[in-house]
Amino acid sequence: MLVTESIIGIQNNQASLSVDLIGGALTDFHLHNNVNPLNFKLSPQNMPDINRSGACYQGHFLCLGHWGPPSGGEKQAGLPHHGQAASLLWVEQSSDHINEILMQVEMPLEGLHLARSINLDANNAVFKVNEQVTNTNPLGRLYNMVQHPTIAGPFLTANTVVNCNADNGFNYLQSSKPLEHAAKWPGGIMEDAGKMNISKPDKACSSVFCFTIEKDAALGWITAYSPENDLLIGYLWNRKDYPWINLWQDFDGDNIRYRGLEFGTTGMHKPFKQILHEGNHQVFGEYTYKYIDAGETQSRNYLAFLCQTPAGYTGTANVAVRDGNILITAIGTSRQITIKTTLSDGF
């Protein structure tokens, strides 16, 4: 295990993975011969004002407690945008296993504690994350938990293709009445009622498009394919843990700058006070928040992977786990990419 200031790094013969204890973000996941898709980082001046005394958003960070802005009263109390986990210094714990990172963070304003284990496969570009959330409050509470992997250039260009097993969705700018502005993946409805392709944006539109996962799916998955780098990054998780996929896209003029490949417990990017007031407890049959009782611990897992893509690859039709392998099916063909891993238990 390599430690440089706040950065913890683990690696195998194919890939390297780095985590920053300041904010707890996974900041670098790359094949040894290719680029890092997770090199996104905001500068302090571009952070929400309530967050500027804490860590900057970068790479794959965790939104825990709530997703989006705090309420007015919560902001007065010092609660940051996207919850405390992404703002605080995490604590590293010792591990007896090679290529494992153990870390934890206490969120006193949220009344939550998170314990995280990260395991990198011994031979392949796959890692598994387990996160256990404990309510340290004497009362139960509503909460949300959203994984926020974010891609940026040089991996991200106008040609990058995002695929996932999303179903029905809406633009978060229209989330007060989502059913009136519903779209089917990969379609998205913009604020001016225009339509666009979210998989490979054909219009410059900075927003977040929130989708439920296909109803009959046991797993949720999302991939981003960079044709310039012949590289695919993907995530895989149990649908019961995270039934929502949220696609953030940020444009600078006509040029795409960032894309969030987010998945979590909600598609409502707003305070609980507003969710409850608007009556959007469920959308498309999925709850928009979770409940955790006093002293309760809830556990969730996900897998992430990288692979080089073969000639003629244009995007992902499906991702599955079978016999200890991650199977990636390309669009327009039955040909599969197989990634062997020892980390697929529970998927």
Image: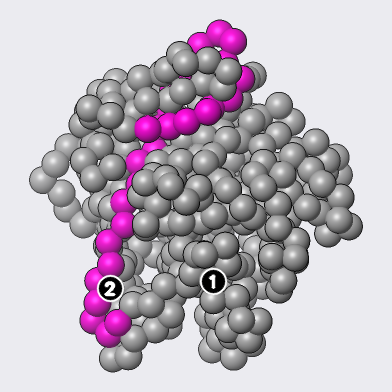
Pinpoint residue 19: horizontal percent, then vertical percent: 39, 47
Q: Residue at x 28, y 42 (%)?
A: 347
| Left or right of 255 on screen, residue 104 | left
Residue beneath disc 1:
282
> Which residues make up the magenta segment?
293-320
- Location of residue 269 with respect to 241 vertically, above or below: below
Which of the 4 image quadrants contains residue 326? top left
Q: Residue at x 31, y 57 (%)?
A: 300
Q: Which residue is mark 2?
A: 134
Across and down, in percent, residue 301 comes to: 31, 51
CA separation in Å, label 1 and label 2: 24 Å
* Disc 2 element: strand
Q: Could you tell me the amino acid type at mark 1?
A: Gln
Q: Is residue 51 visible?
A: no
Residue 224 x, y percent position in the rendering: 56, 33
Q: Quadrant location of residue 292?
A: bottom left
